[in-house]
Amino acid sequence: MTAPQIVVGAAIIRERAVLAAQRASPSYMRGRWEFPGGKVDPGETDTDALVRECQEELGVLVRPLRRIGGDSVYARREGSPPAVLRVWTAELLDGDPVPLEHLTLRWLKVDALDDVDWLPADLPFVDDVRAQLRG
């Protein structure tokens, strides 16, 4: 059995809002929303990948704080290995996020979390984020 590809996402929280990113690609994900992040490379830790991906996708430096929820399984696509999403809350240490690989970014307050069309793998983390924002 093939080990799943690990994908990491950052729930970057600032001023009681979380950063959401609207996907540009691939086409079947275009326009839907996610917690920014990406695939963990071989030999890389989940948190190192999270920091790297935020630098590449947003042009910012983050510090992962704590993992929320469990593994969220991606829908299996023919020809692709199984994959799971792991999400961490993260602190923005340096820079202002810009959509280097996304269509746009939004800071969502607790009352706006349901206003975007989350990707299925990201959706299970929204309630944990909601609790963080209310906390």
Image (cartoon, helix red, strand yellow):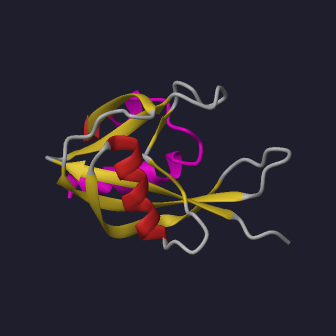
- Give coordinates of residue 37: x percent, y percent: 46, 51
The N terminus lies in which quarter of the figure?
bottom right
- Specify start and end residues of the magenta stretch as a single range: 113-135
Residue ranking furthest to the left? 15
Residue at point 24%, 51% (across, down): 13
Residue at point 77%, 56% (across, down): 81
Please tell me whether the stretch drawn in magenta is mainly helix, strand or loop.
helix
- Give coordinates of residue 43: x percent, y percent: 57, 75
Q: Is residue 49 magenta?
A: no
Q: Is residue 88 above or below residue 78?
A: below
Does the image show residue 127? no
Q: Is residue 117 above or below residue 34?
A: above
Lateral position of residue 79 relative to residue 74, left or right: right
Front residue (pair 26, 113): 26
Residue at point 79%, 44% (across, down): 77
Q: Is residue 106 above or below residue 79?
A: above
- Give coordinates of residue 49: x percent, y percent: 46, 63
- Give coordinates of residue 33: x percent, y percent: 47, 34
